[in-house]
Amino acid sequence: MKNLGKKIFILLTFLTTTIYASVTARVEPPVVYSGETATYVLTITGEKVHKPVLTDICGNDIIGSSSQTSIEMVNMDYKKSYVLSYEFVPQKSCVIAPTDVEIDGKMEKSNEVKVVVKPASQDKNAAFLLSLKVSKSDVFVGEPFILHLELKQNRRAAVVDSKFIEPDFKGFWVKGKSQATREETPEYIITRADYKLAAQREGNLTIKPAQLRIASRVNRRDMWGSFMPQVKWKNYYSNEVQIHAKPLPNNAEIVGNFTISAEANKQEITPNEAVNVTVTVKGEGNLEDIESFKPYINGVNVFDEKIEIHGDTLTQKLAFVSDKDFTIPPFKLAFYNLTTKRVEQIKTEPIHIKVKGSAKTTTSLNIKKDEAPKLVVKKAQEQSVTAGSAFSYIWLIIAFVVGIIVGAVLMLTKSFQKAKKEKRFNIKDEKLLLLKLLPYKDSDKDVKIIVDTLEGNLYGDKKEKIDKKLLKEVLKRYDIS
């Protein structure tokens, strides 16, 4: 009987946990506006629960999660419940598929849940009112215009925290932003800021609404029926703005009004010394569309750095290397002037560079080979061969042998001097190394890597080390010494 009672108790316990084992799902709130946060809630009842591992919801990343555990009595028995919450930002309406949860050794499925996402809208009567306004809505591609942003906050609105999300500026360059200003009236606190924008392409473009997230305190009942203070977030949206961007007339690519200047750090150099030139363009317009000013100059190596833009000023640094006098041609810029309604061109003055010791004319060298000495043998007319003539022949043979020895010595000496001269090339001389490698830059990617490093070290602010193993392979490959 004792064992029978124990078995009945275990059976009842099993049936109780089985009856109470369940999982339900819901979304709070079920309808959200674009950009708002929703919460996927799983309520799980059971004794032993393996919490599910969720990586996303409807393809949207989970940005936060939390869990709560509660125990309540039902029909003189205790029931344990888990509430799992997952925050996410749905991009579009979707149906959340059932979630599998292991409860007391058995797999249970939740119900599927639908979440509805509506387009962002503006509430004109809200405590917070965002508005966008542009200085002009009909512009040329690249033409700057001003976007005015205004936030009106009701002075009676209580705020715990806030987060401002800027409009989506896709299709526009953001050329600048002003400091926000604040104004107070008896009813509102008004904050204003301006953005300087320019259209990147032609057509009808849209500036999406700005978003303001406001956190305020609310009281909610907990599981025991008591009120508990919590923080609730609410989203407020501005209007959206339509911009019509027109292509530039006369096939122009740049629009605005600019000035251009070029400054060289020196105008007299030694052979293969670099001349650094800075090109500066100032003015209002689409500076981002201006391409590199790197010119082609016959017999001159030209290196250009990346263009930099700060506000209404564009700068580019270039380096010129040559062993003879040369002239840097004018740097030119054509643009469509909105004031004059025509295409204009501006340019700098040419820059003449003097190279000390450079040869202005090339003198050709005519090298004549030494003619072999002619042996003149005169016939003895009236003399016979004597002992004296035999002695002369002996000296002639000795002189011939000595000449051969001297020639051999000279050839060995010349080879030694040549080898010694070749050894004088020092790979640490980066300028000389750069000149030797430049002819192979465009056809060999290994050479390009080394040349780019050398250019950065010589004409930029970089101090990078060259891969010695790669350098030796390249030097050997092209027989450079």
Image (cartoon, rainbow, N blue to C red):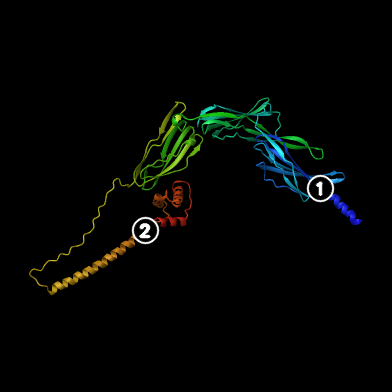
Q: Tell me the CA gap for discs 2 and 1.
A: 91 Å
Q: Residue at x 47, y 42 (%)?
A: 306
The vertical placement of 29 against 479, above or below, is above
Foreground tag (2 vs 1)? 1
Q: In this view, does 64 lie to the left or right of 10?
A: left
The vertical placement of 105 against 206, above or below, is below
Disc 1 crowd rating (10 Å Cα; few below 14, some 14-19, many 20+) is some
Report x, y in % for residue 284.
49, 31
Mark nearer the N terminus (2 vs 1): 1
Q: Quickly name the residue at label 1.
A: 18
Report x, y in % for residue 257.
46, 30
Disc 2 crowd rating (10 Å Cα; few below 14, some 14-19, many 20+) is few
Q: Mark 1 falls on what kind of element? A: helix
- Give, as a three-letter code, the residue at label 1: Thr
- Give, as a three-letter code, the residue at label 2: Glu
Residue that protrudes farthest toward the right in the picture: 1
For the residue pair 148 and 20, the one nearer the viewer reads as: 20
Report x, y in % for residue 295.
40, 40
For the residue pair 238 and 192, the one nearer the viewer reads as: 238
Q: Residue 360 carries which label?
A: none
The vertical placement of 260 against 455, above or below, is above
Q: In this view, does 35 lie to the left or right of 479?
A: right
Kindly indicate the quadrant of the structure image that contains residue 167.
top right
Residue that protrudes farthest toward the bottom in the picture: 387
Kindly indicate the quadrant of the structure image that contains residue 112.
top right
Q: Mark 2 falls on what kind of element? A: helix
For the residue pair 58 and 342, the one nearer the viewer reads as: 58
Q: Quickly name the residue at label 2.
A: 422
